[in-house]
Amino acid sequence: MSDTSPRPSLRQLIETGGEPVLVGITPPRRSTEPEQAAEIAGRTLERLAAVDVDGLILYDIDDESDRNPEQRPFPYLPTMDPATFHDTHLAGWDRSVIVYRCVGKYPEADLADWLRSVDTDRVLSVFVGASSGDKPVHTHLGQAHELRREIRSELTLGAVSITERYTRRGDEHLRMLDKQERGVAFFISQVVYDVGATKSMLSDYFYACRERGVAPRPVILTLSVCGSVKTLEFLQWLGVDVPRWLENTLRHTEDPLTESYEQCVSNARELIAFCRRLGLPFGFNVESVSSRKVEIEASVALAAEIRRLLS
Amino acid sequence: MSDTSPRPSLRQLIETGGEPVLVGITPPRRSTEPEQAAEIAGRTLERLAAVDVDGLILYDIDDESDRNPEQRPFPYLPTMDPATFHDTHLAGWDRSVIVYRCVGKYPEADLADWLRSVDTDRVLSVFVGASSGDKPVHTHLGQAHELRREIRSELTLGAVSITERYTRRGDEHLRMLDKQERGVAFFISQVVYDVGATKSMLSDYFYACRERGVAPRPVILTLSVCGSVKTLEFLQWLGVDVPRWLENTLRHTEDPLTESYEQCVSNARELIAFCRRLGLPFGFNVESVSSRKVEIEASVALAAEIRRLLS
């Protein structure tokens, strides 16, 4: 990338197979006072100023306790609507955002309103279905896809891809193809710790695309540091397969943050080499599943490191 | 290793946590004429002359068709007794050998005779149990262990470790500990292609040893190149988990031999770094599961490359 030409927008990067680097954040709790939310947003933008990221992902958090009977290591607390957080507090962010939508939370009319109003130059979205099949929902994923196609097909839409679903059922790559047929332009993975299984999913996806004569869509690979045993347990509660050897290492080390950071860098290297060699468009997203300051700061450092690895 | 001090024997390397490099070979078919067997042995020693390996593994091949109802990609043909092959044709080999013993094939008296006669300075052994539980056997693994303890406890004995059994049942590391309690001084793994699962097994083994206050035994990690789709299918028939992404790569590439060779080198690097950091004694064994000349030659080259990686 030459210094004189401006970096393309996230939309362009996705369309042209660029290698975007994103940072994923969770909006503040819904109970947060406006001044405090503004302060949180300000601190986030300050941290990100040092890193050349192509976009911010704003998660939409749903109560997923139905999905997992085990006790959630961190309590579930309702968070601000990511679109509201963006509009109200992130005016200082001049790059793209990807607004997640747990579509089951919203009546169709509300989703339609938002789709009509959204600034599709700056905002992309990822629709997420319900966390379990028997959860009552306002809008099903299929309905949400149809709604977008009808009202706002210019909104660049992504979908999630989950390595662990690939490991259990073996068909995640086919689900990705289905979503792609419904207009999905990119994928964002769940947090990746099982690199081998992720490579297998990507490989199966790549060759299934080739067989059908369609171009593979970029897969944004999500990495997340793990600074404590509690964070490790939260990742596992969220459904992330952490390889047993790494779990052992993180449980026995004095410094899980550094250990997991180094592992994330090594995983990024391996995934970059793999995707480039295969010819699969990809990018990275870095998030912190915990709200501890050291873990958030390590995430930002990781995003910067990945940007260097990609250059 | 200084050039002036002789390299320790395989026994010493195993006792002191050295990092031995071995090459595994299958004796010629039982129907081979003596002159031809001598020629095969000569060619083997010639190839190995260029590589500084610490020992030769001589496999004892059993008809394992009971284990897998799928058709065996390469036909099963009875092979020479590895001890006989060693005595008769490998006099030119001045380093150690590890003679495998599929103990179920031998009546206890025969096994006892061999145990009494074996030169324990040059010969180590690995006892292998039956390939399936309902196979009729002459001697059970437990009996063989007891026999050795009674008649020839100075024979350094190894056992196999199987990553895929760890993946399926999760207790392979505990089986290793049991074998260790019965006098096993080292382990030799089945062919490793699933490095992540192998690291997990090694990690669980290491921490289980620590918990019981016993020293972990060296685990010799077996690598094998894969020069064709037929060899790939034979590896899978043998029960080796080849990661799906690598299977796809090997099926789609023009040059599976180079591809798998590079993957083996990369796997060796990862396993070396992992074991050294963990503090687990280890070594490598390279074998070719096919008898094709290019694959055998690539195996010898791989052994040489691993020797360089370890130095």
Image (cartoon, coloured by chain):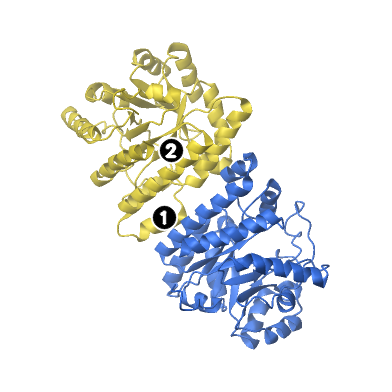
Chain colours: A yellow, B blue
Q: Where residue A247 is drawn, which disc sits there?
A: 1
Let me know if marks 2 and 1 both belong to one chain.
Answer: yes
Q: In this view, does B214 lie above or below B169?
A: below
* Residues packed near mark 2 inside 10 Å, few (<14), some (14 to 19) or many (20 plus): many
Q: Can you tell which quarter of the image residue A75 is in? A: top left
Residue ID for mark 2: A190
Disc 1 secondary structure class: helix
Q: Could you tell which of marks 2 and 1 lies nearer the N-terminus?
A: 2
Q: What element carries label 2?
A: strand
Specify the label residue B214 is tagged with.
Answer: none
For the N terminus of chain A, the quadrant is: top left
Is A211 positioned to the left or the right of B185 in the image?
right
Rendering coords of residue B95 (x, y %)? 60, 76
Q: In which quarter of the image is residue B128?
A: bottom right
Viewer-nearest residue: B34 or A42:
B34
Label 1 chain ID: A
| Front residue (pair B6, B176) | B6
Q: Label 2 is placed on what type of residue?
A: Gln
| Residue in the image at 72% along x and 69% along y | B41
Which residue occupies 47% across, 60% down?
B309
Q: Report the front residue among B96 and A14.
A: B96
Relative height, residue B140 to residue A31 (above, below): below
Image: B259 above or below B290 = above
| Residue B213 percent coordinates (x, y) | 42, 75
Mark 1: amino acid: Glu
User: Horizontally, is A284 left or right of A175 in the view?
Assistant: left
